[in-house]
Image (tube, rainbow, N blue to C red):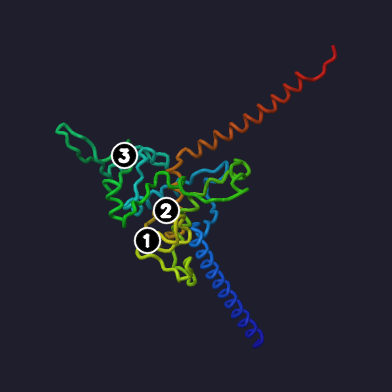
């Protein structure tokens, strides 16, 4: 029995040592990749992982429950800094809300309108035909409130951001049935939101000096433009309350807001995929008919 306990203890110690070595190697590998990225100016340091999305693939569909949670995150967290000026309130009916619910949701916002009969601008409650208002009066005010960099509009963020897949993968991605990878934006947003961390030791500048994160920025190896960005981690565990019992974790939050932003950028994705599938079937049948017609017309016939 004593030998068994000793053996188990040794195995546990060995497992812990192996895990520590793996973590250290991963730590060193990140530092090496960061150093290489800084020297070459190629970002991100780490490419986002391919996540599993309900809307992926030729038959993918949006999860309306997830989209509603993502809208809640946008409203309570993201809308404080980011606009969504190309999305109108009435499109929220696509998330499963009724017309009355959309009207009530829109009425929680105020938008600028006018001029009135006196030639002055005024504010009023938003209606479904209005677009999500910006938290700032103009881009200059947005930049001044965020250290000189205006937060990007989120309307098309999931389509504007993405992952470079390289050759030949990007060719395969263009084939709808075989590849059809269009989730690079959500993958990137998810990775960015969950990727904030302390910079590993050992990162070097091109001149050989130790790298230091610029003051006022936050290290994130998934950021597509540099080693760090000015936006602080925007969300954390238990920050937004879910009413449907979904786990209130950073991982879940990032997945929900990423899916919502994909919907905002492409609300007609499901219809497009259905139409594309029917077109593919039509083209296949049409090709077969053309082949049979050609074979019949140009075949040798006895007279």
> From this viewpoint, which residue is outermost toward the left?
118
Q: Going by the image, does 227 lie left or right of 124?
A: right
Q: Is residue 291 above or below residue 13?
A: above
Mark closer to the chain start, 3 or 1: 3
Numbered circles on residues, count: 3
Q: Which residue is mark 2?
A: 244
The correct choice, above or below, for 18 with respect to 159 in the image is: below
Secondary structure at badge 3 equals: helix
Residue located at (28% from left, 42% from top): 107
- As rendered, which of 116 and 268 lies closer to the eye? 116
| Percent x, y of residue 257 | 43, 51
Residue 219 lies, in percent from the top left, at 43, 64
Upstream in the sequence, badge 3 or badge 2?
3
Residue farthest top in this picture: 303
Mark sitting earlier along the chain (1/2)? 1
Q: Which mark is residue 103?
A: 3
Along the viewing direction, whichever of 74 and 165 lies nearer the viewer? 165
The Cα–Cα distance between marks 3 and 2, rounded to whole angstroms, is 22 Å
Left or right: residue 107 versus residue 1 is: left
Distance (Cα) linking label 1 and label 2: 28 Å
The C terminus - image quarter: top right
Res 232 label = 1
Name the spot of residue 36 as percent of width and height, x first: 52, 63
Disc nearest the viewer among 3 and 1: 1
Of badges 1 and 2, nearer the viewer stands 1
Q: Residue at x 32, y 55 (%)?
A: 148
Q: Badge 1: few (under 14), some or many (20 or more) residues near its Cα, within 10 Å?
A: few
Label 3 crowd bin: few (<14), some (14–19), many (20+), radius 10 Å: some
Q: Is residue 179 above or below residue 277?
A: below
- Viewer can see residue 65: no
């Amino acid at each position: 029995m004593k030998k068994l306990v000793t053996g188990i203890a040794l195995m546990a110690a060995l497992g812990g040592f192996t895990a520590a070595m793996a973590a250290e190697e991963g730590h060193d590998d990140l530092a090496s990749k960061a150093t290489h990225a800084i020297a070459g100016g190629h970002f991100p340091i780490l490419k986002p992982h391919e996540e599993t999305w309900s809307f992926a693939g030729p038959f993918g569909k949006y999860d309306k429950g997830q989209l509603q949670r993502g809208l809640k995150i946008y409203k309570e967290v993201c809308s404080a800094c980011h606009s969504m000026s190309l999305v109108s309130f009435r499109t929220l009916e696509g998330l499963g809300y009724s017309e009355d619910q959309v009207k009530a949701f829109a009425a929680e916002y105020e938008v600028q309108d006018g001029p009135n009969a006196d030639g002055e601008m005024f504010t009023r409650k938003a209606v479904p035909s209005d677009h999500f208002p910006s938290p700032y009066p103009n881009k200059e005010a947005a930049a001044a409130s965020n250290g000189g960099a205006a937060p990007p509009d989120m309307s098309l963020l999931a389509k504007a951001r993405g992952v470079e897949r390289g050759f030949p993968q990007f060719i395969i991605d263009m084939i709808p049935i075989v590849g059809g990878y269009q989730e690079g934006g959500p993958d990137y947003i998810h990775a960015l939101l969950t990727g904030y961390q302390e910079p590993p030791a050992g990162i070097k500048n091109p001149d050989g000096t130790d790298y230091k994160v610029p003051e006022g920025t936050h290290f994130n190896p998934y950021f597509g433009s540099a080693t760090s960005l000015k936006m602080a981690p925007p969300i954390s565990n238990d920050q937004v309350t879910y009413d449907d019992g979904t786990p209130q974790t950073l991982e879940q939050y990032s997945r929900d807001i990423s899916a919502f932003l994909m919907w905002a950028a492409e609300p007609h994705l499901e219809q497009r995929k259905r139409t594309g599938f029917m077109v593919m079937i039509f083209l296949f049948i049409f090709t077969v008919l053309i082949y049979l017609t050609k074979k019949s017309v140009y075949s040798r016939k006895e007279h």
